[in-house]
Image: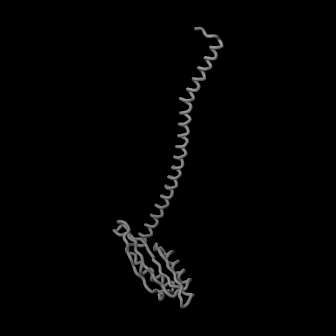
Amino acid sequence: MRLAFREKIVLGLGAFLVAMILAYTLIVTPYMKKMELLDRRIDQKTKELKKISTLSQEYIEIRERMEQLKGKARKRGKNFPLFSHLESLAAKTLIKGNIASMKPQSTPIGEHYKESSVAVKLENITTRQLVDYLFRIENSEAFLRIKRLHLKKRHDNPKYLDATFLVSTYETSKGR
């Protein structure tokens, strides 16, 4: 069977068109899908890398702060007298006579550390005296912090307050 020139051209164009459709379906489309998948993975991994970088920076800052705190704890010495330190700060603030009670507590934290705290109750103090005392506690070289604070106005004289708060510090417990 002999085909005319025109028929050969139509048949050639048809074969070329079928070849192009097959190439697009079997090669180009999977390649495009793979590229989209890889682009999404690149975006995802870039976000993960940024998150890891942020966490790494936070870890470094926390580790440096922990080393500073350990240094302060070592400088302060083992068996730090928290109770007497708070009394001396109260004497410097001129509120030692306003101390109603001081109750020491100790709580183990993990294997090597413990939290020492003192619950302090002050009566008949001014706001200025309380702020001065709390400022001295927070800014002392002894690495102390106020964990809880409860204030109550006096009914007999509204200028004065009753304050209850917990002061805590951390210590090493097994000679570390």
Q: Is residue 51 left or right of residue 14?
A: left
Pick the residue in front: 27 or 25: 25
* Residue at the image point whose x is 63% and y is 14% from the top: 7
In what quadrant of the picture does the N terminus appear? top right
Q: Is residue 15 above or below residue 131?
A: above
Query: Height in image: 40 above or below 13?
Result: below
**What kind of colouring is applied to the model shown?**
one colour
Q: What residue occupies the far left of the structure in this picture?
A: 174
From the viewer's side, name the closer residue of 6 and 20: 6
Question: Residue furthest toward the bottom?
Answer: 156
* Apparent side of residue 110 relative to residue 129 in the rendered image (left or right): left
- Image position of 62 with respect to 93: above or below: above
Percent x, y of residue 64: 47, 62
What residue occupies the far top of the structure in this picture? Answer: 1
The residue shown at (43%, 71%) is: 75
Image coords of residue 62 (percent x, y): 48, 61
x, y (%) of residue 141? 48, 74
How many numbered tags mark residues here? 0
Seen in the picture, residue 132 relative to 29 is either above or below; the reply is below
Q: Quadrant of residue 114?
A: bottom left
Which residue is rendered at x = 44% and y = 74% of the image?
Answer: 168
**Residue appearing at x 55%, y 39% in the figure:** 36
Q: What residue occupies the far front of the structure in this picture?
A: 1
Determine the image quadrant of residue 17. Answer: top right
Q: Which quadrant does the C terminus fall into?
A: bottom left
Indicate the quadrant where residue 33 lies.
top right
- Give 21 or 87, whichever is nearer the viewer: 21
Q: Nearer the viewer, residue 58 or 41?
A: 41
